[in-house]
Image (cartoon, rainbow, N blue to C red):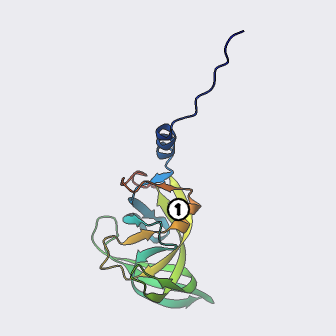
Amino acid sequence: MSPQRVKAKPSLKSQTDTLISDGHVLGWREWIGLPDLGVPLIKAKVDTGARTSSLHALNPKKVVRDGQDFVSFTLPHYRGDGHGRIDCLAPLIEMREIRSSNGNAEERFVIATHIQVGHHKLKVEVSLANRSIMGFPMLLGRTAMKAGRFLVLPSKSYLAGKPEQR
């Protein structure tokens, strides 16, 4: 009688390497594309403590077009070459009270837009805020990470690579 071989369970490292190669692991900062807004590339801080993703937007204003609520706003320096602004118009989901990292709550416009993370394209909710004093113009919150089924390795950066342009 020959001894039965027991199939070895893959190591945590090999499991993690597979997840990374499949694009399901993010570092603490990543390149993000915002195709609906005409932004091919923007740096985002990945923040598991933040529920909602946030984007640095100037002069957000509610406007009505054909009976529907939209938000017009400007994204500074995201034209793709680092110079010039992008004027945007996006459907308004709602006004929402968002509590920032310093504990202050404020009413913000919330839009739904597609984000591109590596080869993943997801529709997520994003609040518009003044992030001018923050280190990153975008914050990727845990709701977006959950939608993409991402894990986070906080000791790494840019694991997803630059977004694939579609």
- The image position of residue 100, as x and y in percent, is 43, 81
How far from the left and from the top, in percent, is residue 136? 34, 70
Residue at 40%, 51% in the rendered image: 159
For the question of whether residue 66 can be seen, the reply is no
**Of 4 and 141, the residue lying toward us:** 4
* Image-based side of 150 in relation to 42, left or right: right
Q: Position of residue 50 (x, y in %)?
A: 48, 72
| 79 or 95, nearer to the observer | 95
Looking at the image, the residue that sits furthest to the left is 83
Q: Is residue 94 left or right of residue 85?
A: right
Q: Amino acid at mark 1?
A: Met
Q: Is residue 106 above or below residue 163?
A: below
Q: Is residue 14 above or below residue 166?
A: above
Residue underneath mark 1: 145
If the image is split into quadrants, where does the N terminus sit? top right
In this view of the protein, can residue 54 be seen by the observer? yes
Considering the numbered disc 1 on the image, is that residue within a helix, a strand or a loop? helix
Residue placed most toward the observer, 44 or 113: 44
**Left or right: residue 30 compared with residue 146:** left
Vertical placement of residue 4 versus 68, above or below: above
Please name the residue shown 52% across and 79% down the image: 90
Q: Position of residue 150 (x, y in %)?
A: 52, 56
62 left or right, relative to 159: right
Q: Which residue corresponds to the image point at 39% horizontal and 57% vertical from the top-left?
A: 154
**The quadrant where residue 138 appears:** bottom left
